[in-house]
Amino acid sequence: MAFDKNAYFRQATMLLCSHLEIEEAMKECLGYLAEFMPVDTMYLELYEPDFGAIRTIATATVEKCEKINRLTRLPQHARDFMMEMWGLIRQGENFPTVIVNDPETDAVSLAMVEDFETQNTSLLVLALAIQGTFLANVVIDCHGKNRYTAEHSTLLTLLAEPLAIAVSNHLKHQEVLTLKNKLLDDNRYLHDEMKQRIGNDIVGENFGLKHVMNMVRQVARQDSVVLLLGETGVGKDIIANAIQNLSPRREMPFVTVNCGAIPESLLDSELFGHEKGAFTGALSQKRGRFERADGGTIFLDEIGELPPNAQVRLLRVLQNRVIERVGGTQTIPVDIRIIAATNRDLEEKTRRNEFREDLWFRLNVFPISIPPLRERKKDIPALVHHFIDRKAHMIGGSQHPVLASGAIDSLINYHWPGNVRELENIIERSLILSQGNPLRFEGAINPPAGFSIDESPAHERPFVELDDTIKQHINKALILTKGKIHGVGGAAELLGINANTLRSRMKKLGIKLPGKVHPSDRPAELYED
């Protein structure tokens, strides 16, 4: 029966493509080649010019196969030959299979058979290349000398292209695995570094936050939805991190979303992702925050700021644990734990039809109310020392800052409208102003001249409308920050809201910037959309 070249090529190619692992594909291919030529072992070898050596990465026989990592150093004349061959391949030369019926006549083959202790052997050597890039050598051997003929060489050369593709795919797959492992290792390192910087302990967990931390420990090991309630600046994000770190998902992703900071037009795409071509500018497929949090936890901060459309889609995620990308038709299951946080009264918002009642009930599974700083002033000394240690390290300095006599008293007597975030800012401001002197906080917490705070008991003060209270609070923040709205130390950060949200409220309430305006917030930019 005549030899069918096409059938031979087709069958060998199918066997080479039958396995992702290259050594398995080599074993299958070698078993087929055994029908046409004498074979014992197939080797896959990479040349590494930096080491002047050949690295064997896989071997196969008809019975077994394995990955290996064996380096064989070459003598200088063998290195010169390999570099010459490499150069010719770059110039577009194609090499047929080389027959080496006596390894002692070939420097490279002699080095290899001596290292593998298979001197009494015959070899077929095929150099694999793609688009002028040398990939590897495929070597087949059999016991005894003078076993291979030109016909055997032709048969192996016919498989040069599928072998090169299989090897190229294998090398790229190994590169992806290496990068993936490197990324996982980097993530673990960064996660550990973050833990060390933030600390595993919550300041105040044995005093003002004792009840909160007891609830955190009770719910952390469950997958229940947690709703964190509290004023701006009380540390809801810190409590969310504590829940994650105490949960079985601690090594999985923890994705934070500030629902008030994402423009409404982009919110669906950010949360749920989009398909290529879903809208103008969607040049490629994008995974949303929920997909990125798969297997871990998603923290939805400022949940009360979600617009109605996003509320409907979030309700579906909570009910069915599936999402659908913008512009897509396929539902994607997600395994996530949801923690939400708000400084709003969501129950009141549902009564005013500003928040979906069914979503409120879905979120209100395990509410944790975090008390404001003015209700846990026993924590202030510990918080002060914590922030001094952290901020002093960031700002730098030859000496560790010390507190002036009575410095803590001025902090305890303050009413803390901005809570822990305001305390942190005051510590940082005081460290900058101290110039190495003992820290005093009176200048940092007292408002500038011309601005007064009514310190009389609440029941003796005249009742004012909500808009007036908000207006006074924003005015105070603007004066403290000298008119700076956005960025570090700006009024938006002090108030714990998005800079665009603050500008919108200022426009609505008719608030003007104080006399001295920060260069980054000139009047022309104040009310931009």
Image (cartoon, rainbow, N blue to C red):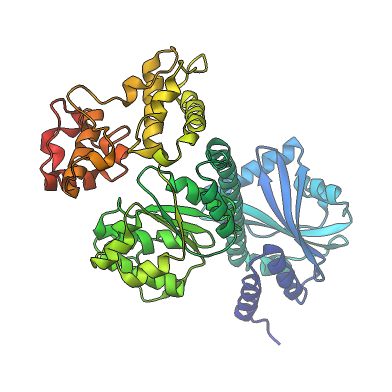
**Residue 94 showing in the rendered view:** no
Q: Count numbered badges in the picture.
A: 0
Vertical order, 475 against 173 (above or below): above
Extreme residue toward the bottom, this view: 1
Q: Toward which corner of the image does residue 351 lie, by quadrant?
A: bottom left
| x 29%, y 57%: residue | 305
Q: Position of residue 208 (x, y in %)?
A: 50, 42
Instruction: Please tell me which residue lies in front, 146 or 462.
Output: 462
Q: Where is residue 422 in the image (x, y as percent from the top left)?
A: 36, 34
Left or right placement of residue 395 versus residue 76 in this view? left
Q: Where is residue 21 in the image (x, y as percent from the top left)?
A: 67, 64
Vertical order, 398 against 255 (above or below): above
Vertical order, 269 against 370 (above or below): below
Left or right placement of residue 411 versus residue 516 in this view? right
Left or right placement of residue 114 versus residue 263 in this view? right
Quadrant containing the N terminus in the rendered view? bottom right
Instruction: Please tell me which residue lies in front, 64 or 285.
Output: 285
| x 68%, y 66%: residue | 156
Q: Toward which corner of the image does residue 282 lie, by quadrant?
A: bottom left
**Residue 235 showing in the rendered view:** yes
| x 35%, y 72%: residue | 358
Q: Where is residue 70 in the image (x, y as percent from the top left)?
A: 77, 48
Instruction: Please tell me which residue lies in front, 474 or 390.
Output: 474
| x 37%, y 70%: residue | 315
Q: Toward which corner of the image does residue 523 lie, by quadrant?
A: top left
Instruction: Please tell me which residue lies in front, 18 or 511.
Output: 511
